[in-house]
Amino acid sequence: MRTSKDRKRVGGLGAAAVGLAALGSGEVVAAVGGASLIDAIGRTLTDTAPLRVVETTVELTGRHDKTVIRFGTVAGALAGAVGLAGLPARWHVAAAATFGAGAGALGLRQANRSAWISAGAVAAAGVLAAGLRTRPRGPLAALALGAAGTGLLAAAHNLNRDHDRKQRSAIRRIGAMGNPAVTPEDGLEDEPGLSALITPEHKFYVADVSPHPPRVDPARWRLAVTGMVAHPLRLSLADLAADAVEFDAVLVCVHNRPGQGRVANARWVGVPLADLLRHVIPASGATRLVTRAVDGYTISLPVEPLRSGELPGYLVIGMNGEPLSPTHGFPARVIVPGLYGQYTGAKWLAELELTDDSHVDYWWKRGWTSEPLWVEPQARIDVAAPGRESAGTTVVAGVAWAPPAGVAEVEVSVGGGAWQTTKLADELAPATWRRWRTTLELPPGRHTIRARVVGRSGAVQTGENRPPYPSGPGGFHAVTVEI
Ligand SMILES: Nc1nc2c(c(=O)[nH]1)N[C@H]1C(S)=C(S)[C@@H](COP(=O)(O)O)O[C@H]1N2
Ligand SMILES: [Mo]
């Protein structure tokens, strides 16, 4: 005989299976149009979570933030189904409909492919309502339904992968951007474990609020330069490529604590924003340049320093000899070398709008400052290898950055002792990272090595430990070696 506890467990399992089947059905419908219900919900969670929750999630999940949010969303949906199943049966249809309407509204809120997300939400609500009324009896039926739901999620995943593949081949057809024949060099011999001078695209960190990069059709895409200007523009990728130049710069996320990998160096291709602003002629009250992504996300920059060159911004269309990849902002993004990623400009640009001070950015609403934040100089230790070069010496090497003025010196200190200078590689450009290397003679025992950078502006990296919020992280990267 079954106890009531057993029945309850089967009931919960059955409801979770119904939830999985409902989510899978909705996800397949959305995926036909290249959208994702799960990602729409995930994005809404990111958009609405309190700042403290966002900061903690960034801190704890590292480079896996998107995966964690996705699995969290699925787990939340299943828990929601179990919760709904606990309601009296006569409420199930109404509750499922409410759930679906909520998810559909999330879809409509997302500027990108909202119709498909909403259609997926309707499908999910239908399956949820029907499933809760005829809940699977017994664990086997529940498992079978759960397996079907998992299969649907996998099918949706494959559909979306096909859309991604098409997007990548459309980008490949564009051809090279810039001059990929020239390989940047800094005169430093290769060192196992030391970062490359130019970070390959697949190793370049990714940081954004989009669970999945929006897909933009290069043939139909036009960048609108609008708002308070005398001459609005609509520019194709080819128009932009004709006026683009190459520049080298490091990109740093404001969440990059000392020693972390939310930083990378690339050779970019872009149109100087000062040139673009000269063409459109901003009206006298136009104080902000809003960089607006296709999904509505914005980062805005003050116009005057962009015009004067104090903020040396670019409208970027290429990275490391190729068009931007989907993850890094295809077809266009804005980068101001020296500003943290969160302030430098949006990826997946739809529009550059000139407007006045009434504009409010995505992150300002969440509590971050409206002043552009400059990157703090930082040195990172990539290699600390005792005995690599010769017995008794330790090779120490890494990268350091102090944009926009550049790195003047990188120093290391052992166990809190005096700062000793290191050998710097040639400088590619002041706004890039610079590689450095030294060998230390250390006696047997445990030693903590710290690194710091001195900027050409005179700024010296300080050891004061600070969290990323509110003005960027601080502190020294420290590595301990055992001789
Ligand atoms: N559209 C859009 N652009 C964005 C963001 C975003 O969430 N959406 N994130 C910014 C942040 S916080 C950073 S650090 C950089 C990261 O660029 P990457 O992913 O190419 O490294 O993009 C910036 N541009
Ligand atoms: Mo960032």
Image: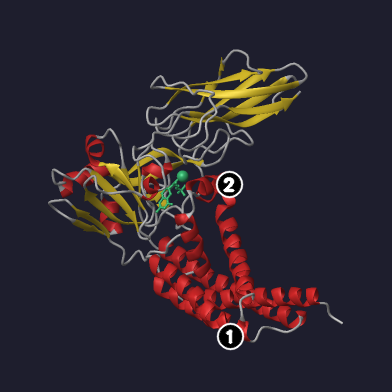
* Picture residue at 83% right of the left edge, 77% below the top: 3
**Residue highlighted by disc 2:** 62
The single residue placed furthest to the right in the displayed view is 1
Image spot of residue 144 (x, y percent): 71, 81
Instruction: Using the image, determine if residue 326 lies above or below residue 183.
Output: below
- Left/right placement of residue 391 relative to residue 326 reads right
Residue 164 percent location from the top left of the image: 49, 66
Residue marked by disc 1? 130
Secondary structure, mark 1, is helix
Mark 2 and 1 residues: CB-CB less than 8 Å, in contact? Answer: no
Q: Nearer the viewer, residue 123 or 303?
A: 123
Q: Residues within 10 Å of mark 2 (few under 14, many from 20)?
A: some
As displayed, is residue 417 above or below residue 235?
A: above
Q: State the CA–CA distance, disc 2 to disc 1.
A: 39 Å
Q: Is mark 1 within 8 Å of ligand 1?
A: no
Q: Is residue 14 left or right of residue 313?
A: right
Q: Is residue 468 visible?
A: yes
Task: Residue at 48%, 47% (x, y): give it.
Answer: 51
**Res. 387 visible in picture:** no
Q: Residue at the top extreme?
A: 418
Amino acid identity at mark 1:
Ala
Position of 277 with respect to 447 (left or right) is left
Q: Residue at x 54, y 23 (%)?
A: 463
Q: Which mark is residue 118?
A: none
Image quarter of the C terminus: top right
In terms of secondary structure, where does tag 2 sit?
A: helix
Residue at 31 percent across and 67 percent down: it is: 220
